[in-house]
Image (cartoon, grey):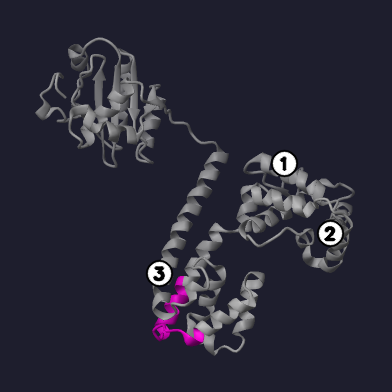
Amino acid sequence: MEGRPVSKRRAYQSSPVKNILLEKVLAEAPDGPVTVGLDVGKGEIFAVLRWKDGTFERPWKVKNPTEILVLSRLLQELADHRPMMVAMESTGTYGDPLRQALTNAGLDVRRVSGKAVSDYAEIFDGVPSQHDGKDAAMVAELTALGKSWAWPYVQKNEQDAKMAYYVDWLDVQQDVQTLWTGRLESRLARHWPELTGLLSLNSVTLLRILIHYGGPTLLAADTEAAKKLAGWGRHVLATKKIEKILRSAKETAGVKQNEQDIARIRQYANEALEAHREIHCAEAYRKAMGLNLKERSSGKHQGKLKITKRGPAIVRRWLYFAALRAVQNPAVKGWFEAKKARDGGRGKGAVIGVARRLALAMYHVGVDEEATFEAWRLFPGKSSARRALQKKQETRSKPRSDAAAFTSLAKNA
């Protein structure tokens, strides 16, 4: 920091913010605007002022969070005397209380890219190292050079906050699933190494096999194992694959298990499956669209079920249009007409009911690459008649069917 009013050796020596006398700082400072760079840490914040002539004040040390208001009041007072911008890097949640306080104080809060700060380190003072005081000074200088953008703190609305919550929850569950599948992988490598060559560690079928049997020994001894595997795997698990799994259980080169080994694998698989269900859940998918039901009891609507309408309205709009088309399909029309009759001839509730089923169908078509949309599956209670009607309709018309159109919509959603 040569050419500045402090020696290079002591350029980054900090002073507690509570000891700063602003009148003295302003009396010794050059005229013109000032930029303030902030380096935010969990326990401390460092603030550095850069004046128009390129000189810097030594860092102010601020305890985080107990001295945030002290700093914001000091900077607010400084802004009354000089045009000022305050900048920081993105710091996750540690900087949010400070950013809120600065925004509430009416200050021009800016953001500087962390990569820009890292790249600028050697250019700034000829030394590639980084530390708190220097980082704050670089943030101030990059802001003065026009390398920042507005970043006031804005409170999220209810919808954005809810979406952020879901994203965060799913991210945590993904980490949990990764943890347990990693532990499972090591156990299977010891006791049943052939299994992961036949089924993916993230396979629900694999997890159900391990929850039920805990390893190869009990599976190999079960005469009903093939039937159970077929039930868990359904159409995804071919007969040949089932035969290979059974053979691997009988002929495995893995280390023989004791009771504790079996219990351990069962528990790991169960935890992994629970996390998987949190991530891949059709009901949660529908809930995020605002199509889940809640009861509204009031003087006007006593005990009636309504959709919550949380989440993006445009998704519900297009699903409603898809439902209007779907109710014309013979496999759906019977249910629609019956529901409409129960509602006194009003069809809106029936259309919403179909839209809710379409949301679940979209989830399953999107998650399972081998799944295709079939209208009769929306209401499988009387599936045989509906299947027959749909097949008759499909053979009669060559153009793209409703099922194919919706499958395309689901795949591209």
Residue at screen point 62% across, 43% down: 311
The kind of secondary structure element at disc 3 is: helix
Q: Position of residue 222 (x, y in %)?
A: 57, 88
For the residues bearing labels 1 and 3, Cβ distance under 8 angstroms: no
Magenta stretch, main secondary structure, is helix
Query: Upstream in the sequence, badge 2 or badge 1?
Result: 1
Q: Is residue 253 magenta?
A: yes
Q: Which of the 4 image quadrants contains residue 204? A: bottom right
Q: Nearer the viewer, residue 349 or 397?
A: 397
- For marks 1 and 3, the one nearer the N-term is 3
Magenta part of the protein: which range?
A: 249-268
Say which of marks 2 and 1 sits in front. 2
Would you name the residue on which mark 2 appears? 331
Q: Is residue 360 above or below residue 203?
A: above
- Residues at marks 2 and 1, CA–CA distance in whole angstroms: 22 Å
Question: Do the numbered discs 2 and 1 sit on residues whose CB atoms are within 8 Å?
Answer: no
Residue at 67% across / 40% down in the picture? 313
Q: Residues within 10 Å of mark 2 (few under 14, many from 20)?
A: many
- The disc at residue 317 is 1
The picture places residue 309, in percent across and down from the top left corner, at 67, 43
Residue that carries the numbered disc 3 in the rendered image = 183
Q: In the image, which is nearer the foreground, mark 1 or mark 3?
A: 3
Whole-percent x and y of residue 168?
48, 49
Query: Where on the picture, by quarter, is residue 236?
Result: bottom right
Marks 2/3: CA distance?
Answer: 46 Å
Q: Residue at x 41, y 80 (%)?
A: 191
Label 1 element class: helix
The spot of residue 103 in percent (x, y) is 41, 26
For residue 296, say whether it is visible. no
Q: Residues within 10 Å of mark 3 (few under 14, many from 20)?
A: some
Q: From what the image shows, is residue 283 above or below residue 46?
A: below
Residue type marked 1: Arg
